Image (cartoon, rainbow, N blue to C red):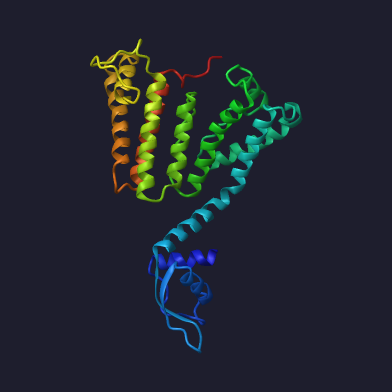
Amino acid sequence: MKEHMRILELASRDALPDPIDEDSDIPVSIVRELVQAGYLTAIDASSFDGIVYLDMHITIPGREYLLRLQQREADAPEKELIADIERLRGMLISVSTGGPRIDDINESYHELYTKIDAQLINRGITNNIPFPDLWDWYGRWRSGDLPSYQSRRQFISEIINPLTAQVRQHAAGRPVVQVEPTGWQRVDRAIGEVRRSLAKAIDEEQFQAVGLLCREVLISLAQAVHDPAKHPSLDETIPSETDAKRMFDAYITATIPGSAHCVARRHARAAYDLAVELQHRRTAKFRDAALCVEATSSVINVIAIVSGRRDPAKT
């Protein structure tokens, strides 16, 4: 597959030699495979003397195939890290759902957690797994709000899935958007889906879909913090369930003292407008979507700070 990728990369730059025959440095048998598969167009000048191709160009399916090969190549160095993270997921879930005793696997868990943490640091990715020890996880799941096995599996997945998505984004050379879990499960789950969607997006429709998801995240965030009894609307219009702007306006104004709330309100409104605009932009590109994700993530962090969810732990 590496030879397929090399030939298609040359073709994408119009850098293939012309002609290609059995004496060329480019394997003519692989060129034939790519032509027959529809990934390259070429003039077949073959004769009894041998195979010859002229005037080769990459096709749209060829570009899509090249992108898949490049993605696979980019993922290769990260496969071991992702496999380790999945092993860690298994340990966290198994001890909390009737599996092995903590003392039986805690030492192995420590070693694996330390290894993963070091590899994430090397990649500039924040380790958002908050349980360096399985007894820490025990204290969390026994706190009362994770009564069922399913709720514990989902809680761990909402931590692990965004992390593996960030590892894949890093492997693909795309910017990694860091957002610490807020504790608002719907928001954390949704922003994880946003990051996964951005990592996979390759065309205008998929980049537009990132805008839609960002809008939904901001609506969920506004719903999580807005209390009509404590945060009255600034224009006396009762916000609808999807009126994120009015909910943010009311919450931020009631929560941040002084004139600082004006800047924070504009920030939240601008992020929402950016998401709506991206959702409807028929020429959306990766940079548009990445900017939208960054703005949405920033608002999540701002609201988490304002609400006290980023305050240092009391000792």
Does residue 167 appear left or right of residue 261 in this picture?
A: right
Residue furthest bottom in the image: 48
90 or 124, which lies in front?
90
Q: In the rendered picture of this protein, how many numbered marks are placed on residues?
A: 0
- The residue depicted at 58 percent of the width and 41 percent of the height is 119
Residue 235, relative to residue 244: is it above or below? above
210 or 71, which lies in front?
210
- The residue depicted at 28 percent of the width and 38 percent of the height is 277
Q: Position of residue 219 (x, y in %)?
A: 37, 27
Q: Quadrant of the C terminus?
A: top right
Residue furthest top in the image: 229
Residue furthest left in the image: 235
Q: Quadrant of the N terminus?
A: bottom right
Q: Position of residue 24 (x, y in %)?
A: 49, 79
Q: Position of residue 260 (x, y in %)?
A: 29, 19
44 or 167, which lies in front?
44
Residue 111, relative to residue 284: is it above or below? above
